[in-house]
Image: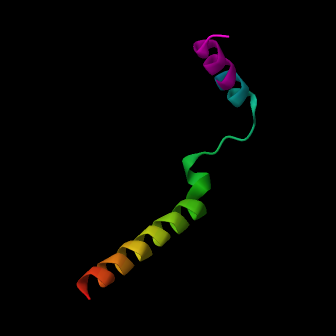
Amino acid sequence: MKPNSRFIKSIVAAAKTDEVRLPWTRGATRQAAIELRQRTEAHQTEAKSA
């Protein structure tokens, strides 16, 4: 099977699923990741300045 054929089959299979994650549905997960990154950056800044 050619790689392009596998790619097309995977795209068609993904399109047939009903679980489409739109950007506004991942708000809580995205916000948690942003907060974690900000806390990590703040901690690194404190460690460098000390």
Residue 39 at x, y = what percent? 43, 76
Q: Nearest the camera: 30 or 43? A: 43
Q: Quadrant of residue 22?
A: top right
Q: Quadrant of residue 11?
A: top right
Residue 14 at x, y = what percent? 69, 30
Q: Nearest the camera: 24 or 41? A: 41
Q: Is residue 50 magenta?
A: no
Residue 21 at x, y = what percent? 64, 45
Residue 8 at x, y = what percent? 63, 17
Q: Is residue 1 above or below residue 14?
A: above
Of the 4 image quadrants, the one containing the C terminus is bottom left
Residue segment shown in magenta: 1-10
Of the 4 image quadrants, the one containing the N terminus is top right
Q: Quadrant of residue 42?
A: bottom left
In the picture provided, is 34 more to the left or to the right than 43? Answer: right
Q: Is residue 14 above or below residue 9?
A: below
In the picture provided, is 13 more to the left or to the right than 50? Answer: right
Q: Is residue 5 magenta?
A: yes
